[in-house]
């Protein structure tokens, strides 16, 4: 059994990670300031092996027991959140990552940071392998998130190279599942909320832009495998099956049995036109690939969440 620290552990992904680490017999210390996470996501975790600390990782924090793994997940993640919290997003990627890395160094822990496909920015290479350096607009509204994550990656590699910290970087592609907030602005929770209320489904642009959607259980499995490997360079974890937003909207309507119609709205600034991970490295290195496909994952989300949670009613 290891002691694992999860920053951002009361958020969507962090709470699923806490669940899985606990179910594998680990002790889990969860740190969160509830900026975008909630107590509801972790309130079922009553085990003696689970400890919650209400703290902001942009301030220094200390743990007075040995820690073997640090999973650094704290950060606003949805455009709605990081556009509302631009300075905080930059601080959490910089100061927050410094503090989490400093703690990993002190404890000689394995450190894994949650990076993102957004470090690739506008994908001029498709699908995106880890060797693609990206094409990010640093001064556009999304720059606060993309550049914070790029800085966090650079910082992680510097701690590894200069300070000898045992680090890992996971580049997460769009992930969905139970506990997403119905109003967090991301496509799947928005479409599910609209479909379950028979309201118009709002697709940005003409809906021809693509995304690759990963079910949360697949993602968590890949992340734990990466943390338990000895790899230091970034690894893409995502489902390479690519859908247009229009296909996604139609699939959500089918799965929910909705009577919603599809309507089109203006594309947000710097919205990537395509997004698809190249997961060759994850397959070779971790023997990992996703097993839950979109329709099944949507059904599981529906079954596990219930209509009230998905509509916020
Ligand atoms: P989320 O908003 O649900 O979770 C983020 C958590 O971090 C929240 O609980 C929030 O309260 C917490 N947090 C934010 N600032 C904090 C601070 N200063 N101190 C302590 N806690 C703080 O988002 P998520 O979707 O679960 O994303 C988790 C991580 O994964 C993020 O780092 C995100 O960038 C990354 N990621 C997520 C996706 C995705 O598809 N969900 C894709 C790529 C990367």
Image: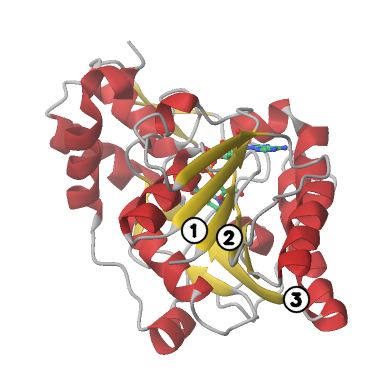
Single out the residue that lies furthest toward the bottom.
284
Q: Which residue is mark 3?
A: 165
The residue shown at (42%, 60%) is 26
The residue shown at (16%, 31%) is 256
| Front-most of residues 131 and 65 | 65
Q: Is residue 127 visible from the viewing direction of this image? A: no
The residue shown at (75%, 76%) is 165
Q: Which residue is mark 2?
A: 117
Q: Residue 230: where, in percent of width, then height?
A: 57, 85
**Disc 2 to disc 1: CB gap under 8 Å:** yes
Q: Which residue is mark 1?
A: 173
Q: Is residue 263 left or right of residue 170?
A: left
Single out the residue that lies furthest toward the top.
313
Element at label 1: loop
Q: Quick one: quadrant of the C terminus?
A: top left
Q: Nearer the viewer, mark 2 or mark 3?
A: 3
Quadrant location of residue 102?
A: bottom right
Q: Distance of mark 3 from mark 1, alpha carbons?
A: 25 Å
């Amino acid at each position: 059994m290891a002691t694992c620290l999860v920053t951002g552990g009361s958020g969507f992904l962090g709470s699923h990670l806490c669940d899985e680490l606990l179910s594998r017999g680990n002790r889990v210390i969860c740190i969160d300031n509830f900026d975008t996470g909630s107590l509801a996501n972790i309130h079922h975790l009553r085990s003696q092996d689970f400890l919650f600390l209400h703290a902001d990782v942009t301030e220094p924090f200390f743990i007075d027991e040995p820690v073997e793994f640090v999973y650094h997940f704290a950060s606003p993640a949805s455009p709605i959140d990081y556009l509302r919290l631009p300075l905080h997003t930059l601080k959490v990627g910089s100061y927050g990552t410094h503090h989490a890395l400093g703690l990993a160094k002190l404890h000689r822990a394995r450190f894994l940071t949650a990076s993102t496909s957004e470090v690739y920015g506008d994908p001029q290479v498709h699908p995106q392998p880890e060797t693609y350096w990206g094409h990010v607009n640093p001064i556009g509204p999304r720059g606060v998130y993309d550049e914070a994550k790029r800085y966090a990656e650079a910082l992680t590699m510097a701690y590894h190279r200069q300070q000898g910290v045992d680090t890992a970087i996971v580049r997460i592609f769009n992930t969905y599942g139970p506990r997403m907030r119905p109003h967090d602005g991301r496509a799947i929770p928005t479409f599910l909320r609209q479909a379950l209320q028979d309201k118009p489904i709002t697709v940005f642009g003409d809906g021809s832009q693509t995304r690759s959607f990963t079910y949360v259980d697949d993602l968590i499995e890949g992340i734990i495998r990466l943390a338990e490997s000895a790899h230091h360079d970034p690894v893409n974890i995502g489902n390479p099956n690519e859908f247009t937003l229009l296909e996604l909207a139609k699939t959500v309507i089918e799965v929910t049995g909705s009577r919603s119609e599809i309507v089109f709205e203006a594309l947000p600034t710097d919205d990537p036109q395509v997004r698809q991970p190249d997961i060759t490295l994850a397959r070779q290195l971790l023997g990992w690939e996703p097993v839950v496909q979109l329709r099944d994952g949507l059904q599981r989300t529906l079954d596990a969440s219930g209509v009230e949670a998905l509509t916020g009613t």
